[in-house]
Amino acid sequence: MEFVLARLTEEGHCAFPRADLTRKAVEMLAIPADIVSAAIDHALEEKRLVARPELSDGNMIFLASLDVSEEILSRNILALARGCHPCPPIDVPKAIAWVEQKTGLTLADSQRAALTTALASKVLVITGGPGVGKTTLIKLQRKFRIGPTNGRSGFKCLEVCAR
């Protein structure tokens, strides 16, 4: 099961719903579902996998190492977000209009909401599937120095801005 979950992480998944993991493992490994289910149970008992039934997508199954990483990352993000914002407040609608005028882009409502949140937040995590505007927001952030980047997002910014 670790192999299947590792492959799914390559597709961008940190965890996968148990029923979907079972189906995917049956497809990938050509093993009957009852054996896959037993293997998942065994890996959970051995603590190589972790189940998080409280997550919105149902009974999510994580690789143990990714579960620990997610927990540490969550705590660190919460710690970074505490306290006052280090920058003075700005007129967000005016700033968005200025950015749109300078770039010739018309931001979607969800992008405007994300940019509004970015300007008011010490920490912002932008997620979503292909085509929702994550790359556009990264480009705007880099071009107009909306906020600092570091870590993986910094590398993503460099990759996107190099295009």
Image (cartoon, rainbow, N blue to C red):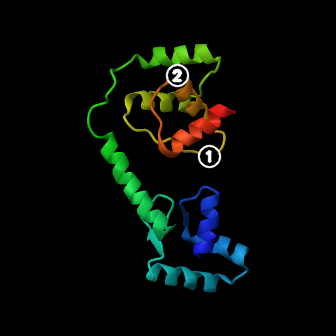
Q: Is residue 102 visible?
A: yes
Crowd class of label 2 (few under 14; some 14 to 19; many from 20; radius 10 Å): few
- Element at label 1: loop
Residue under circle 2?
144
The three-letter code of the residue at mark 2 reads Phe
Return the residue nearer the eye: 15 or 147: 147
Name which quarter of the figure residue 83 lies in: top left
* Place of residue 96 in the rendered image (x, y in percent of width and height, measured from the top left): 51, 19
Return the residue nearer the eye: 137 or 160: 160
Crowd class of label 1 (few under 14; some 14 to 19; many from 20; radius 10 Å): few
Residue depicted at 59% across the width and 28% down the height: 108
> Who comes first in sequence, dot 1 or dot 2?
1
Residue under circle 1?
129
- Left or right of residue 112: residue 88: left
Q: Is residue 20 positioned above or below 32 on the image? A: above
* Place of residue 14 in the rendered image (x, y in percent of width and height, measured from the top left): 53, 59
